[in-house]
Image (tube, rainbow, N blue to C red):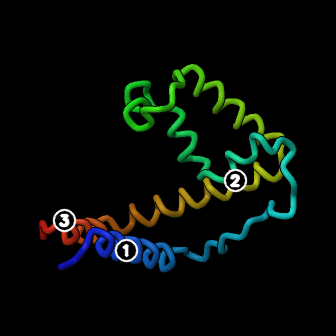
Amino acid sequence: METRVAIDADFIQLLTRLIAESDDGDPPFKRTGEDLSCSQPHLGQWIDRCDVPFLMDTLALSDHVFGQEFPGLRLSQQERTAFAGTLEQHCQECASCHAKQAEDIAWKLRVEKTIARNKHAIADALAKASGKS
């Protein structure tokens, strides 16, 4: 019997392998701003602890979806938009957080490119994992 954890691990391994194989000579990811200190650590902790594109997408969710995903967190879309703007401004001004943001965006693009190039293999893996193949 295959568990959900095993299925998830198989899919992650497939995605990892596909990303590694499709790098097209892209440089390996190396944190360029690690030796820099954040100018505003209370904001920088958000950048350090989260994937920046995911964080921004999360903050941009509609109130309805955000409320469903984070039921204990009462932030209006206006408050989340303002916070996202503050984080964006911080990333423009802070070298450390700018580097992390750039790396996160580059990684997202690399993953999206890999998924686009390997739709059939990924669809087959998902179908197999869900028992629909």
What amino acid is labelled 1 in the image?
Answer: Ala
> Which element carries disc 1, helix, strand or loop?
helix
Q: Name the one closer to the observer, 96 or 45.
A: 45
Q: Residue at x 81, y 53 (%)?
A: 96
Q: Quadrant of residue 12?
A: bottom left
- Identify residue for label 1: 9
In primary-sequence order, the first of circles 2 and 3 is: 2
- For disc 3, the marked residue is 130
- The outermost residue toward the left is 132
- Relative placement, left or right, of 119 versus 36 is left
Look at the numbered discs 2 and 1 and tell me whether their residues touch, using CB distance below 8 Å.
no
**Residue 68 on image: x %, y %:** 37, 33
Which residue is rendered at x = 58% and y = 61% of the image?
A: 107
Residue at 43%, 24% (x, y): give it: 63
Q: Amino acid at mark 2?
A: Asp
CB atoms of marks 2 and 3 within 8 Å: no
Which image quarter holds the C terminus? bottom left
Q: Is tag 3's residue or tag 1's residue first in the polypeptide sequence? A: 1
Residue type beneath disc 3: Ser
Q: Position of residue 83 (x, y in %)?
A: 65, 29
Q: Quadrant of residue 23?
A: bottom right
As drawn, 92 above or below 61? below
Pick out the residue farthest to the front.
Answer: 72
Residue 55 position within the rendered picture, expressed as x and y whole percent measured from the top left: 57, 43
Within 10 angstroms of label 1, few (less than 14), some, or many (20 or more) residues?
few
N-terminal label among 2 and 1:
1
Q: Secondary structure at mark 2?
A: helix
Residue corresponding to mark 2: 48
